[in-house]
Image (cartoon, rainbow, N blue to C red):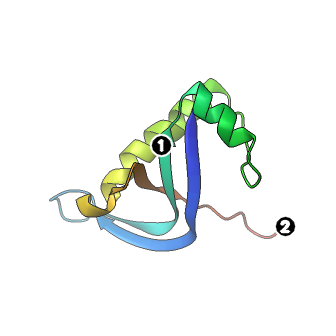
């Protein structure tokens, strides 16, 4: 289980992903703080007001976890952690108007 805190819901970013020319990634993202939680902590969290639970299929959960770990490297090393939280970016996609 992962606890997510959506910290900055709309952030423009630009990051170099390597030493090769043209290896820049940029776009809109959501800055999130996250950490793995055990069953006991999960039970406590779900009983608190202001906390929402979202059940995901296992394949989606693993893709989310991988995206959090991979996109964490887009941040400077000093910004990848805050206290006992991991910090990462999740790409933000907007649907065109209907």
Quick one: SS at disc 2? loop
In the drawing, does residue 11 fall left or right of residue 78? right
Structural crowding at the residue carrying mark 1, measured as other residues with C-alpha within 10 Å and reported as few (<14), some (14–19) or many (≥20): some
In the drawing, does residue 42 fall left or right of residue 85? right
Residue drawn 54% across the image and 28% down it: 38
Residue drawn 57% across the image and 49% down it: 4
Q: Looking at the figure, which quarter contains the N terminus?
A: top right
Residue drawn 49% across the image and 54% down it: 33
**In this orientation, which residue lies closer to the viewer: 95 or 76?**
76
Structural crowding at the residue carrying mark 2, measured as other residues with C-alpha within 10 Å and reported as few (<14), some (14–19) or many (≥20): few
Q: How many marks?
A: 2
Percent x, y for residue 13?
42, 71
Q: Looking at the figure, which quarter contains the C terminus?
A: bottom right
Percent x, y for residue 18?
20, 56
In the drawing, does residue 62 fall left or right of residue 71? right
Task: Farthest residue to the right: give it.
Answer: 98
Query: Disc 2 marks which residue?
Result: 98
**In this orientation, which residue lies closer to the viewer: 38 or 13?**
38
Eye-nearest disc, 1 or 2? 1
- Sequence-wise, the earlier of marks 1 and 2 is 1
The correct choice, above or below, for 43 with respect to 91 in the image is: above
**Quadrant of the rendered structure where residue 79 is?**
bottom left
Residue drawn 52% across the image and 31% down it: 62
Q: Which mark is residue 18?
A: none
Q: CA distance from mark 1 to mark 2?
A: 36 Å
Percent x, y for residue 12?
47, 74
**Quadrant of the rendered structure where residue 87 is?**
bottom left
The correct choice, above or below, for 57 with respect to 97 in the image is: above
Query: Disc 1 marks which residue?
Result: 35
Evaluate whether residue 47 shows in this view: yes
Evaluate whether residue 76 shows in this view: no
């Amino acid at each position: 289980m992962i606890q997510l805190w959506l910290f900055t819901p709309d952030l423009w970013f630009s990051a170099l992903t390597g030493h090769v020319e043209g290896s820049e990634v940029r776009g809109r993202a959501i800055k999130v703080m996250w950490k793995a939680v055990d069953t006991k902590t999960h039970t406590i969290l779900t009983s608190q007001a202001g906390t929402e639970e979202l059940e995901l299929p296992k394949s989606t959960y693993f893709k989310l976890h991988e995206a959090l770990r991979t996109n964490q490297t887009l941040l400077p090393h000093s910004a990848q952690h805050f206290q006992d939280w991991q910090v990462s970016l999740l790409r933000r996609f907007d649907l065109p108007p209907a």
